[in-house]
Amino acid sequence: MSPSIAVVAYAFVILTLFLLHRDSKPEVSRALWIPVVWLSISASRQVSQWLGGVALEAPTETAFVEGNPLDAFVFAALLVAGLVVLIGRRRRVSTLLRANGPLLVFLLYCLLSVQWSDYPAVAFRRWTKAIGDLVMILIVVTDPEPTAAVKRVLARCGFVLIPLSILLIRHFPDLGRTYNSWNGMPYNIGVATGKNGLGYVCLLFGLGSLWRVLELFRTWRLVDLFRARKSSLKAGTLIAHVAILVMTGWLFWMADSATSLACFLLGGGLIALTRYPALVRRPAAVHLLIGVLLSLTVYGLLLNPGAGLVEAVGRDSTLTGRTAIWNQVLGMTVNPLFGAGYESFWLGERLEKIWQTNPEHPNQAHNGYLEVFLDLGLLGVTLLGVVMAWGYRSVVRALRWDPEAAGLKLAFFVVAAIYNLTEHAFRELHPVWIAFLLAVTVVSGAPQRKAE
């Protein structure tokens, strides 16, 4: 198949997915397209990278410090548009913000840490993008139908990024593949900028489709889906999401992203388990399940890498060189209480020193908790821990009155907690961070609306 014909064919596939997924009820706000665009860019490539072709910017200190004016304009425009929407919903937003105090305290501390950063202007620009992430979540959860809004956002992003990744890998390898600058090994990246990026595209939007498929199978019998017009719409939705799951499985195989695949299996298992009322009605059982799951993961990955868990997902006991990076950054001078400032550790002399000794030129510690310590110190790690504990409690409580939505939130929470053991995702514009925000954000008054 020629590339031009492939473009037409895949455009038809994407259009078909949207048509199959059409459903006028419940109605959601058109403003959801703002977080759809924001999340799609965050999960794939910056606008300047799409317009500039396959060649991604060289990892230089100048690129990290200065950024790209076009990308800054795009994100600023989306942020302003999002704020305009929230101003129109100011009563709901005010109530929601009051219910999410720990998260606001954490973000305000991040802003305060800009003051002691060696690059305060860079740190502040990055912090505004983190606020943009929160704005996008607020647009979703303040929608008149928040659960339907979550479904639409995940579906719209997945219906575009998943098929487009396959198109780029199969028919445009100059765009869909890249090569390791050190050993020349080829990687399939699809719409992302690296194989791990393709991994979390599959992780998040694959979980979104699995969530919908399990919901449809639980609510309707398959034979009844094809009878009436209303049922045919549900059948179309089922077909669209099953197709995305099939594509996601192929992309996981092509991406070779062990962390994302393991998190997908764990998250999918949690979504399936929360469909059982006997479990969700017993918070103690949920706590035990999550505690055992997290404990085994931490033990197998960090405390005893030789136990076999690391090898089971195709990695060595050094976690593909991550332990060497951890030892190196922990040995560098940084304020243990306050850190280097928000997203500021990998700048300046520290970055130059690391790159002089590491030919792969890393720009993160490949551990979200360690990264928070380096940027925000012990105080930042403590505040993040408070946010996680508070958010987890709200998710478990929501399982009793809205297990459908809370099941996905629990999966996103656990996925974020585990993913950050070997990758840095507690950062602005990272899709796993955005999913984490969706999971921990408390929707005030939700039990009353559900009862009504």
Image: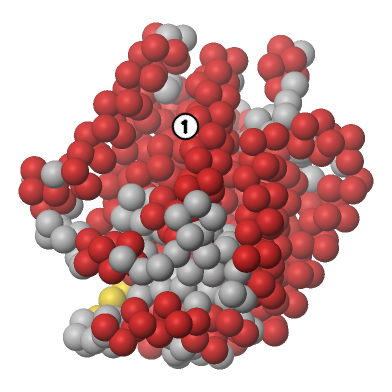
Indicate the quadrant where residue 288 lies.
top left
Q: Is residue 45 visible?
A: yes
* Residue 104 image position (x, y, % from top left): 69, 42
User: How many numbered dots are placed on residues in this image?
Assistant: 1
At x 45%, y 82%, the residue is: 349
Asked whether, in this view, residue 309 is left or right of residue 426, the answer is left
Residue at disc 1, secondary structure: helix
In the image, residue 398 sits, relative to residue 387, either above or below, namely above
Q: Nearer the viewer, residue 373 or 231?
A: 373
Q: Is residue 201 visible?
A: no
Asked whether, in this view, residue 94 is left or right of residue 115, the answer is right
At x 58%, y 82%, the residue is: 65
| Crowd rating for badge 1 (residues with CA inside 10 Å; few <14, some 14–19, many 20+) | many
Q: Quadrant of the N terminus?
A: bottom left
* Residue 185 image position (x, y, % from top left): 21, 82
Type of colouring: secondary structure
Q: Quadrant of the C terminus?
A: top right
- Give the residue at mark 1: 410
* Residue 184 image position (x, y, % from top left): 22, 87
Asked whether, in this view, residue 213 is left or right of residue 260, the answer is right
In the image, residue 421 sits, relative to residue 145, either above or below, namely below
